[in-house]
Image (cartoon, rainbow, N blue to C red):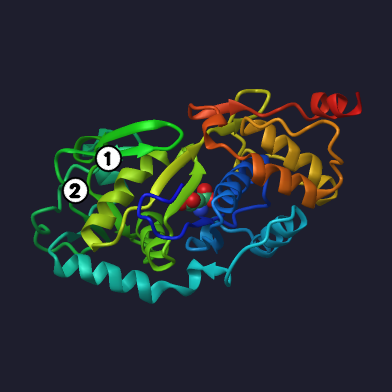
Amino acid sequence: MPSPSHKPYRGRFAPTPSGPLHFGSLVAAVGSYLDARARNGQWLLRVEDIDPPRELKGAADDILRTLEAHGFEWDEEVVYQSRRNAAYADALARLDVAGLTYGCACTRKEIADSATRGIEGLVYPGTCRNGLATGRTPRAWRIRVPDGSIQFDDRIQGPVSQQLGSEIGDFILKRADGLYSYQLAVVVDDADAGITDIVRGADLKLSTPRQIYLQHCLGVPTPSYAHLPLALNRQGDKLSKQNLAKPLDAARAAASLADALRFLGMQPPLDANLADLPSLWQWAIANWDIRQVPTGDTASKPDYDDATQARAI
Ligand code: GLU
């Protein structure tokens, strides 16, 4: 099936180097890779090292090595967000010329004292929207968001609709510490890379309307979106670098890949030689069907021990 834009498929995986890859990130990598390869598409890699305070030294290289050990093959050179400030500055300048941005002088505390709660944190109350009070200097740059809803049709989750104005509010493009925001960077990078199809974790589903709005403002195409359920651990918490999810072990790459395939609704044959990564990938690419992926924002991670036992039978 051609991508909605009828352009050749270009997908991507965009890890933040805040720690080693874990099962949850493997699921996102596998889902985006299979969707691209099953449609004879390209699959690009972008290291989202835009936020140095959140990064762990050495994590970017470690992520690339782990992906390699799991049999991923990416097209083109890896893009590093830390080297793309000029592109983000240019996009911000274009939005500014279009009258869509404004400087915001509010401190975190001022916002906390006056904002209402939205679906993802506080909704900026618009204090600086019509100009700064005298004597105040801008700390951050925000974009004005319109009233009305932004909608998209998620290939896994179905129709999604969000009222940007009341549920999110005018959001930040450049932070008080001088760093560009994830929302701006991701839109600029996906557009510059010609990404047609985004497959990623459902933790970013609520970000998508902000990104679609930015695409409209910048006059770039909107890719198609598919948000994969997030893996939960036995305690029902999301696997994340913050809660120290176990790093992937390159020595059991094939078993982890098989677990990720099962998580995505596939049934790799038990008689497959699971130590043989290339055959497992070949099987997965030939059998990928996004309609088998469980819908919903979360799903339980398969139990490693059960999976190992099942294979031994
Ligand atoms: N860097 C983000 C993460 O690691 C993913 C961004 C995206 O796929 O748009 O969660």
Q: What residue is at 42 percent from the left and 51 percent from the top? A: 3
Question: If you read the primary sequence from the N terminus, does the residue marked by circle 2 or circle 1 appear first?
Answer: 2
Q: Is residue 272 left or right of residue 161?
A: right
Q: Which residue is mark 1?
A: 168
Q: Is residue 62 left or right of residue 270?
A: left
How packed mark 2 is, by other alpha carbons closer than 10 Å (few <14, some 14-19, many 20 or more), is: some
Tag on residue 291? none
Disc 1 residue type (three-letter) = Ile
Question: In terms of depth relative to the viewer, which is nearer, 303 or 96?
Answer: 303
Q: What residue is at 45 percent from the left and 60 percent from the top? A: 8
Q: Is residue 172 left or right of residue 225?
A: left
Disc 2 residue type (three-letter) = Val
- What element does badge 2 sit on? loop
Question: In terms of depth relative to the viewer, which is nearer, 102 or 190?
Answer: 190
Q: Would you identify the image quadrant in which residue 103 lies?
A: bottom left
Q: Position of residue 82 (x, y in %)?
A: 49, 70
Residue 202 seen in the current view = yes
Q: Position of residue 2 (x, y in %)?
A: 43, 51
Q: Which residue is mark 2?
A: 145
Q: Is residue 174 left or right of residue 295?
A: left
Rendered view: 44 above or below 166: below
Rendered view: 238 above or below 69: above
Residue 241 seen in the current view = no
